[in-house]
Image: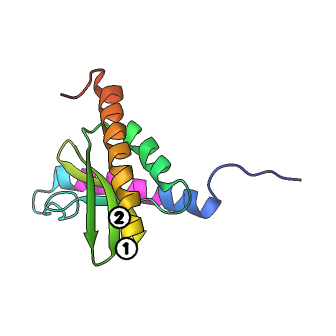
Amino acid sequence: MTITTGPPAAETATRAGYAAGMRRLADILDEHPEVPVPVDGHLGPLVITFTGENAVAKMTAASAVIPCEWTPLFRRGSHGVMLALEGRLDGLRIHLTRYLGDEDDSLAEYATGHVAELHEVALAAHASVTGRTAA
């Protein structure tokens, strides 16, 4: 019997390929000023979306390892309710995002409760990265 822990092989290969591509793109941007800076992450945020069970807990874990000062966001829009943490990693704008679905009052109440939780997450992540609490 084989017991597998961690992400499936396809997800691991996707993650490795994406990371390698990002590193190569960073090198190209450093070496070739004729290549413009991508819109995602510069004019608009690079969005990392969390789905499935424990999505907010996964956002919390991610925010703790990305050295940003995070700002929690809550928005209602055409895609429903969105919870996000907004940060900047050097010159790269990042959103850690969780979409909750169609707009309705129960989702708005859920999201409103999680904004306070995400604010605490943002403060804890800032403290863990900088060694000091945010003002």
Expressed as whole percent of the image width and height from the top left, the position of residue 72 reads: 27, 48
Expressed as whole percent of the image width and height from the top left, the position of residue 110 reads: 41, 59
Q: Amino acid at mark 1?
A: Asp
**At 41% from the left edge and 67% from the top edge, which residue is drawn?**
106
Do labels 2 and 1 touch, CB within 8 Å?
Answer: yes
Rounded to the nearest angstrom, the CA distance separating label 2 from label 1 is 6 Å
Residue 19 in magenta? yes
Quadrant assignment, res 34:
bottom left
Q: Which mark is residue 104?
A: 1
Residue projecting furthest to the top: 131
Quadrant assignment, res 108:
bottom left
Label 2 secondary element:
helix
Closer to the camera in the image, 57 or 109: 109
Quadrant assignment, res 81:
bottom left
Q: Is residue 76 left or right of residue 118?
A: left
Residue range highlighted in magenta? 16-28
Q: Amino acid at mark 2?
A: Ala
- Residue 66 at least partly seen: no
Q: Which mark is residue 108?
A: 2
**At 22% from the left edge and 63% from the top edge, which residue is drawn?**
40
**At 29% from the left edge and 32% from the top edge, which residue is drawn?**
126
- Residue 19 at least partly seen: yes
Q: Is residue 9 left or right of residue 29?
A: right
Q: Is residue 116 left or right of residue 71?
A: right
Expressed as whole percent of the image width and height from the top left, the position of residue 120 reads: 34, 37
Residue projecting furthest to the bottom: 78
